[in-house]
């Protein structure tokens, strides 16, 4: 998936979207992925959020983690107030399918050889990313 197509497809999702990035290495024939081996000048940060105004990705940083709720730089609250003043129950989900346009593994990761590559697949690559979305707990789909 080219970078522009990825951003275009992500911008069609609900407002709260988070992209998680990791880089991998092979040790004794087994792939090991971690955000700690991202190369800052070449790779995006571990977490990015979509700027809905201009369609760009905003880097998010987590300088220190003191408890579990700070592990991911997202609002873990399950209740959110909508624009009309009503509150609704929400949950974070890993996006497993882009209308069958992109291949992902059983945990929602898409793999490629670098982050600017136009082809992302469900296995084999040096980098990986997955998309988190926050949707209403009552909703059963992203449509």
Image (cartoon, rainbow, N blue to C red):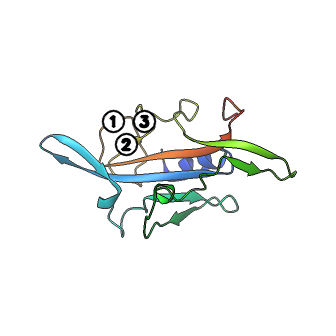
Name the residue beneath numbered marker 3.
Answer: 107
Quadrant, the C terminus: top right
- Label 3 CA crowd tier, 10 Å (few <14, some 14–19, many 20+): few
Q: Secondary structure at mark 2?
A: strand
Given contact means CB atoms under 8 Å apart, are the residues at marks 2 and 1 in contact? yes
As drawn, 139 above or below 50: above
Q: Residue furthest left?
A: 28
Name the residue beneath numbered marker 2.
Answer: 111
Residue 133, by quadrant, is top right
As drawn, 115 above or below 135: below
125 or 67: nearer the viewer: 67
- Label 2 CA crowd tier, 10 Å (few <14, some 14–19, many 20+): many
Foreground mark, 3 or 1, reads: 3
Q: Give the x, y percent position of residue 20.
A: 46, 52
**Is 47 on the left or on the right of 89, as rendered?**
left
Given contact means CB atoms under 8 Å apart, are the residues at marks 2 and 3 in contact? no
* CA separation in Å, label 2 and label 3: 12 Å
Q: Which mark is residue 26?
A: none
Name the residue beneath numbered marker 1.
Answer: 123
């Amino acid at each position: 998936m080219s970078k522009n197509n990825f951003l275009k497809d992500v911008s069609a999702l609900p407002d709260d979207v988070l992209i998680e990035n990791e880089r991998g290495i092979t040790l004794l024939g087994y792939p090991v992925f971690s955000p700690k081996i991202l190369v800052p000048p070449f790779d995006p940060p571990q977490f990015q959020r979509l700027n809905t105004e201009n369609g760009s990705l905003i880097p998010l940083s987590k300088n220190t983690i003191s408890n579990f709720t700070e592990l991911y730089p997202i609002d873990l609250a399950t209740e959110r107030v909508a624009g009309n003043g009503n509150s609704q129950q929400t949950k974070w989900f890993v996006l497993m399918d882009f209308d069958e346009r992109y291949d992902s593994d059983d945990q929602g990761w898409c793999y490629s050889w670098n982050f600017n590559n136009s082809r992302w697949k469900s296995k084999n690559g040096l980098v990986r990313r997955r998309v988190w979305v926050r949707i209403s707990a009552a909703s059963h789909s992203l449509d």
